Amino acid sequence: MSLLEIDNLHVHFLSRDRLGEPRRARALNGVTFSLDRGEIIGLVGETGAGKSLTAQSVMGMLRPPAHRIAGTITFDGRDLATLPDAEMNAMRGSRIGMVVQSPMTSLDPTARIGAQLVRIQQAHGKIPRQQAEERAIAMLREVGIPDAPRRFAAWPHELSGGMAQRVLIAMALINDPVLLIADEPTTGLDVTVQAQILELLKREMTARGLATLLITHDLGIVAQYCDRVAAMFAGTIVEEGSVADVFAAPRHPYTARLIASAPDRVDLSSRAQFAGAPPDLTALPEGCVYRDRCPRAQSACAIPPPKADFGNGHAAFCHFPEPA
Amino acid sequence: MAVLRLLIRRLFFALPILFGILLLTFLLVRLSGNDPAGVLAGPTATGEDVIRITKQLQLDKPVWQQFIAYVNTLAHGDLGRSWLSDKPVVRELLIRLPATLEMVIGGGILGALIAIPLGLRAALRVNGILDHSSRILSLIGFGAPTIFLGLLLIYVFFYLFGWAPPPMGRLDLLTTAPPTITGSYLIDALLTGNWEAARSAAARLVLPCVCVATVYAAPLIAQTRAVAMDVLASDYARYARACGLPPRDIRRMVWRNTAVPVITYGATELVALFGAAAVLELIFSWGGVSQFGLMAILKGDFAVVQGFTLLMSLIAMAIFAVADIVVMSLDPRARK
């Protein structure tokens, strides 16, 4: 049994338009994947594909108008979706660590770095203050913050973006999680800093045997740091497999074009509209969600695509997968 | 250290600001079209009387000469004498100040104690019962003119129900005032253990303070709610939840981050209350300094108007300085 198993997860945004008519945006449509201990999976896709929403679902942090309509999320043998709030809250920040994309604004501006690192430890267990402080300083040192004892007393606004991201990584790791969710951890950082942060993450993930869900726009990051990759389009995982298999021979037309358009390294956020507008989640086509933009689409695509299995965990959801 | 720097900076800028205010007030009262000499002389006075008074007040001289003469006396710590009562302006103002402070500060504290928790709760439970009731309270405070609110409260609680004492001054008729220590009857009575006077002063304070509190709470509720909602939707509040911090920690964090803009805003509104107080003081025959200042404006007692404006400016500066010090203690970014 895998550490994290997401099965047929459906999340919809339910709201009403100005005339009071109910509106339903189908943001996640049957997301299914699993993650083993020590494994790094890269979740890629354009903006609005549902990558972050998937992460939020795992964290139990969906807020109205987002609602989980169907599906299960099993973490370490327990169904997170039915877990009481208090137990889910105990899980966040201890068993599941999270790193987010805007480190500068994600730290409490009115609390010192050290206080925030102590606070998260004390939120998840009885630990003497002094011990928590020592652990915090050790953790700051571990994530490569120079002069850790002095930084312990620093305020968030005194940190650079890269430093702040290191602090967030320290926050995520300090309670020894088994699962790490990194939601675009390097977006908005300088390129050189990006590489440092990713190296740090990779080192920690390997050393701790962490299962990691890495959400990114950047195929280059996936190729370099992940074991497996899952490509998302319109709230659906259209293809998944090992990084080697998928990059060598993408089978879903979407993944194929994604990779083809990225000779070395592509930032999807800046080119989200290659070959068509983002899908309208309130009016997704019947059958395959990629139908409207797909060059290979035929009338058969109006029925939901089957799972085409290519062995070694490589699969695509498509009626007419690309030849290898 | 940062506090000291702030105070020195404020003191440094206080003088030019006060001078500007002084000049502006001086010109404005002289442009107001009031004829103080005529008012002072009264309806039975002859033309000669008016000319004599005009000369006596030096109103026949050019405005710039009047201003220089005024600044000259002011530099010697003298605000001059009231043209109406012929008493020193400083004394006239200071003797009435405690009454106003008692009402405005009391009402302000009451208003803040209602508005801030209510605004925070409303933000935590948007569209809940508290949210809606706080919006109604806010609407009343915004919508009802102070004078109407005051008269309504008097009508209901004094005239209809008889629960409140008559709106005539700060003490019951037969109660002797406690010896002056702070000037606030309530505080002085409590300090001297005069329970009867304390009870009487407190009872008289209720309605005016409720009025002030309502006027103060209205914008403060809306502001607190709006800021707290921003804070709740912020990246750091999201991340705090992702860290599994207990609700108690999150509430404390939301409050600390909400407090900073709310305190700054609250200070501005508190200063505005001193103006709103004039009407309330009139209705409740309070005898405060705002009422006195308003009457001086209406009667053209220029010396008092100038002194009053100066006093209010000093109060505003003091309130802003206190607010900034509190903000500095809460927000490290303000300490740079």
Image (spheres, coloured by chain):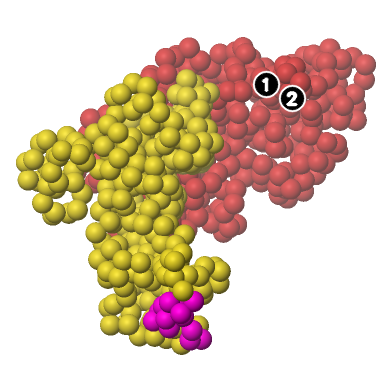
Chain colours: A red, B yellow
Residue ID for mark 2: A18
Residue B89, above or below A151: below
Mark seen at residue B278: none
> Which quarter of the figure is the C terminus of chain A placed in?
top right
The crowd level at tag 2 (other Cα within 10 Å; few <14, some 14-19, many 20+) is: few
Q: Position of residue B21 (x, y in %)?
A: 45, 71
Q: Relative to the observer, which residue lies in front, B180 or A295?
A: B180
Q: Relative to the observer, which residue lies in front, B169 or A224?
A: B169
Q: Decide whether residue B53 is among the magenta residues.
A: yes
Q: Position of residue B91 (x, y in %)?
A: 25, 66
Three-letter code, disc 2: Arg
Residue B96, above or below A206: below
Magenta region, residue range = B47-62
Q: Relative to the observer, which residue lies in front, B171 or A138?
A: B171
Q: Decide whether residue B247 is among the magenta residues.
A: no
Q: Secondary structure at mark 1?
A: strand
Q: Secondary structure at mark 2?
A: loop
